[in-house]
Image (tube, coloured by chain):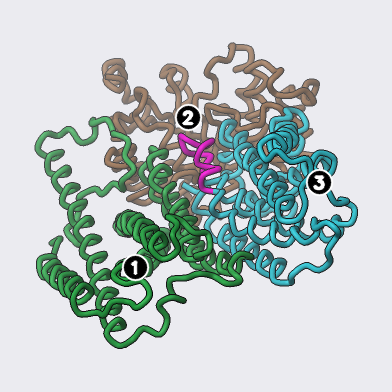
Amino acid sequence: MGVAAESQRERALALDGLTRRYGERTALAEVTLTLEPGLTLAVLGPNGAGKTTLLRVLATLLRPHAGKVAVLGHRLPAESWAVRGRIGLLAHEPLLYRELTARENLRLHATLHAVPRARVAQLLDAVGLARRADEPLRTLSRGLVQRAAICRMLLADPDLLLLDEPYANLDPGVQAALTPLIGAGAGKTRVLVSHDPAGALREADLVLGLSRGRVSFLGSPSELDDAALRGLYA
Amino acid sequence: MYGKGLRALSLTTALAVALTLAAALYWAPNDAYLGFLQKIFYVHVPLAIITLCGFVAAGLMAIAHLRTGDSRWDVRSYVAIHISLIFGVAVLITGSIWARGAWGHWWVWDDPTLVSFLLVMLLYATYQPLRFAIDDPERQARYASVFAVTAGVFVPVCFAVVRLGPSYVHPRTLDNVNSNLPGRMQVVFYLALVSMTLLWVTLWRFEITAKHVAAQLRALRGLLTEQADDAPARRSAAPTLTGVGSET
Amino acid sequence: MRRPRTLAVVAALLRAQLRLELRTFEALPAMCLFVVTAFVLFHFGLNVDALSGNLASGVLWVTLLLAALLAINRIYVADAEQGGFDAFLLSPAERVALLGAKTAVLLVYLAVLELIALPAFAILLLEPSLWQALPGMLGALALGDLGVAVIGALVGALAVRTQARDLLGPLISLPLLVPVLICAASWSAPLFDYPHAAGVAVRWPAILALYDALFGLIAFALFDFLVED
C-alpha cells in the first residue's frame, strides 16, 4: 500500500482488465487505462463496440465481471455507494418522465439526490429552460429536452461527467449554449462517447478506441493520425 | 470431473425402485377398504413429499446463487425445479386416479394436499416462460432465483393457508384414510420414500452433468472455430454455463 | 455527499407516479370500468339478480383481484420505458424506497377503485345492505389490499423487464394471491349473509396479516436483486 494507494486515490479513473460479459459473448474485455482528474477521455469505435457498456459500468449501473474498476478513488462495485451522486450520466434517453414538466422531473431528482430545491431553479436558469420549465416534456423540442437532461445530470454537482453522444441531433446553436456546462471548459473530469471523431478529438486529452469490446487504441489525440482513425472504425 | 459416482448412484436407485415395486405389489397387504387401488398411495405420497422438498431445495439453491453470483447454483436450482415439475405432474395424475378410486371423482376440492399442489404447480409452471422471456443471461439467472426464493417460501405457506380454508373443516385426506399404517405398509412406505428421493437426486445429477458437458463442448467448439464471440445468441430458458473450469 | 431520507424518497416517487396517472389516466379508469363490466358479466353468467354470503364475497374479491392485475402491469411501465429505473439507480437513494413507493401506489389505486367498486357492487349485485357490512369490510379491504400491493410491487418489478410482461405479471401474481383471496373472501362472507349475521372468525385477519408481513419481508429482501444489474 502506501504511495501506490495514494496515487490511486487521486486518479479520476483507474481501470485494470475490466471485463463485462453478456452470456457467452464479451461486451468489454481487458480494458485498462487511467485518467487524471479534470481531463477528458474520448471513447471512439463502431456500433456495438462496447462504448455504452463502458459508460454504464463507470456509472455503477452495471457490475464488472472481472478486473478492477476505481472511479474517483473508490473501487466498484464494493464502494459504489460512495460515488453514486458524484457521477453524472447523460445517456441516449433523457431519463425523465415525458408527461411531467422539467421542473417536476428535476424536483423529483433533487429529492433522490438530497439536493436543495433552489438548485433546480438555478440550473433551469443556467441552461435557459426557465421559461418553459412548466410544460410537459413531451411538448418540448429535442434540444430543450436535452437541456433538461443536462440539468438532471448536474443537479448534484458531480465530479465525473459521463456523456453519451451529448450533441447528437442538436443544432450548433444549442451545442454552443451547452458547452460551458458540459464542455472541456467546465473543469470536470469527462468521459465522452461520440460518433463525431473530429469534434471529440478536439476536446480530448486521452483517446480510447474500442472494437468488439477490446481496446484497439489508447493514447493522446496527437498520436491518432488519419489512417489510425480510419482503422478504429474498420 | 462431472458425473462422479453417477453409475453407482443410478444402480442403487434402480435397485431401490425395483425393491419398492416388488414390496408394494407382492409383500404389502391389500387395504381392507380400497383394495388394490390403495397401493397408488405408495407412489403418490412419497412423490408429493419429494416434489415439495425439491421446490424448497431449489429456493435454497437460489439463495446461494443470489449471495455468491455463481452460475452453478443457478443451474442446480433450475434443474431442481425442472425435475420437481415433472414429479409434480405425476403427483397430480396419481392423486387424480386415487380420488377417482376413493371418492368417485377425478378431482375433489376437499383434499387440501391436492388443491395446494395445484396452486404450487400453477405457480412453478410460469418459471420456464419467465426465463425464456429474458434475453440477458445474467439477469435471467438473477430473476429466476428471485422467483425460486419467493415460490419456495410460498410452498409451505400455501399448504398451511389452504388447510385452514373454510371447506376443510372435515377434510378428506389421504392421510386420514391411511393414518396408523400397520407394520408392513409402513415399511413399504418408507422404502418408497427413500427410492423416490434417490430417483430425484439421480435425475437431478444426470441433468446437471449433461448441462456441464454440453457447455464444455460448446466452449471447445468455440476455441476450435474461433466463432464464440460472433455467434448470435439463441434465446433459451436454460441457464448458460461458460464451460470454464471442471468442478461439479 | 448526502443520502436522502428514505421516506422522503418514497413520498417523492409516489407523488410523481400519481401525477403521471392523473395526466395519462392509464390505469384507474380501466380498472373501474373493468370492475363494473365484470359485475354485469357475473349477473349474466350466474343468472342471478342478487348475491349474498359466500357467493357475494367471492364475486367481489375475485373481481377486485383481477382489476388489480391491470394496475400491477402498469405501475412500472413508465419507469421501464422512459429510463426511470436508470435515473433512480444513479441516485444514492435506498433501493427499497422504490418498492415502498410502488406498494403505496397500488394501495392508493385500490382504495380509489374500491370507492367505485363497492357502491357498484351494492347496486348491481349485492342483496343485503352494504352499510351493515362496511365496518367489518374495512378491515378485510385494508389487509387484503396490502397483500395485493406488496405482492404486486414485487411481481411487477420482476415482470416488467421481460419480453412477455403483460402475461407473466398476472400468471405469477395469481397463485401468490390465492391465500389473500382465501382469507379475504372467508373474512367477508359472513358480513354479506342475509339476514345479516354477526361475527368474523379471528383467524382470517390473523392469517392475512401474517401473510402480508411474510411477503413484505420477502419483497424487501429480494428487491435489490431485481433492480441492480
**Residue occupying image coordinates x 70% and y 24%:** A137
Q: Residue A231 lies in what quarter of the image? A: top left
Display colour for chain B:
green
Residue position marked by numbered label 3 in the rendering: C126
Residue position marked by numbered label 2 in the rendering: A192
* In contact (CB < 8 Å): disc 1 and disc 3: no
Task: Give the answer, above or below, for where A210 lies relative to B26.
Answer: above
Secondary structure of residue under mark 1: helix
Give percent across and percent down for residue C109: 74, 43
* Residue toward you, A114 or B128: B128
Give percent across and percent down for residue B212: 20, 53
Secondary structure of residue under mark 3: loop
Chain drawn brown in the picture = A
Display colour for chain C:
cyan
* In contact (CB < 8 Å): disc 1 and disc 2: no
* Residue toward you, A153 or C142: C142
Prevailing SS of the magenta stretch: helix
Q: Amino acid at mark 1?
A: Ile
* Residue toward you, B97 or C143: B97
Q: Amino acid at mark 3?
A: Leu
Q: Chain of mark 1?
A: B
Q: CA distance from mark 1 to mark 2?
A: 56 Å
- Badge nearest the viewer, 1 or 2: 1
**Residue with the most extreme bottom position:** B183
Residue position marked by numbered label 1 in the rendering: B50
Q: CA distance from mark 2 to mark 3?
A: 65 Å
Give the residues in magenta.
Answer: C159-172
Are the residues under badges 1 and 3 in a single subunit? no
